[in-house]
Amino acid sequence: AQRVTQPEKLLSVFKGAPVELKCNYSYSGSPELFWYVQYSRQRLQLLLRHISRESIKGFTADLNKGETSFHLKKPFAQEEDSAMYYCALSGSGSRLTFGEGTQLTVNP
Amino acid sequence: GAGVSQSPSNKVTEKGKDVELRCDPISGHTALYWYRQRLGQGLEFLIYFQGNSAPDKSGLPSDRFSAERTGESVSTLTIQRTQQEDSAVYLCASTSRTALYGYTFGSGTRLTVV
């Protein structure tokens, strides 16, 4: 079975502060991890994939297999980063399992 | 098309009625997924189509739920004898090969059962 846990439903930071959205997973094999984002009144969209080792909009995420985590980080949060963030896992490549999401608010 | 299109965007129905939700994926995307998102909760997998293979129906919550897809085109999700707990946003996504390439989501259908 595969499971994704995002322990924080809500996260609030000030503009310019570092931000870390936590994601822990449970999967017996080698998973592929993703972060998706939903801005207000927009559709859910892919933010970044572990497989691509990319940095998007200043966000990065490192896969820690020992701690089974894939936390999303940004050193200096911006107001436009306010959104709902979902961590997702693919075990076999057939489909994604999503966490319950974290609502990030960046205050001015 | 340019993106994944879902219709209707909103649907209010009376308890006990049947509803049909439609998803038009990106042209050429072989894989299509349906998810349900209840208020304040995460995305719950319902069903997955990959090309002409048999669909993965393991997420359908009851036999009132069914879905069809003809080839690599439009999919319809049907909910029979709707119940209040069926109220949710139903999201459709497609991808060109596997989930590893990331989903493209539609804007969803908000279903309210009264």
Image (cartoon, grey):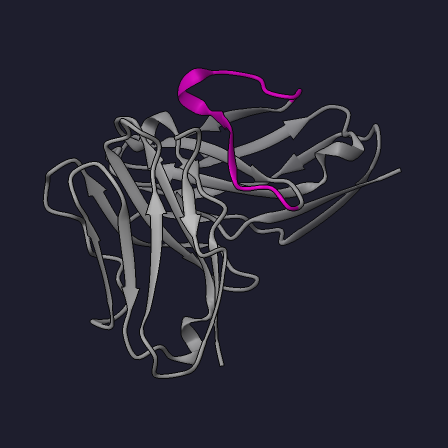
In the rendered view of the protein, which quadrant contains the N terminus of chain B?
Answer: top left
Q: Find the magenta span and give its range.
A: A41-58
One can see residue A27 in this view: yes
Looking at the picture, how far across and down is residue A93, in whole percent? Answer: 26, 33
Looking at the picture, how far across and down is residue B113, in whole percent? Answer: 46, 76
Residue in the picture at 29% in, 26% down:
B96
Say if the magenta span includes residue A53: yes
Question: Would residue B19 appear left or right of A84 to someone viewing this image?
Answer: left
Query: Closer to the camera, B22 or B49?
Result: B22
Q: Is residue A71 above or below residue A25?
A: above
Question: Would residue B40 appear left or right of A78 to someone viewing this image?
Answer: left
Residue in the picture at 26% in, 62% down:
B60
Q: Is residue A57 above or below residue B38?
A: above
One can see residue A28 in this view: no
Looking at the picture, how far across and down is residue A12, in whole percent? Answer: 77, 46
Residue in the picture at 52% in, 24% down:
A62
Residue in the picture at 49% in, 81% down:
B114
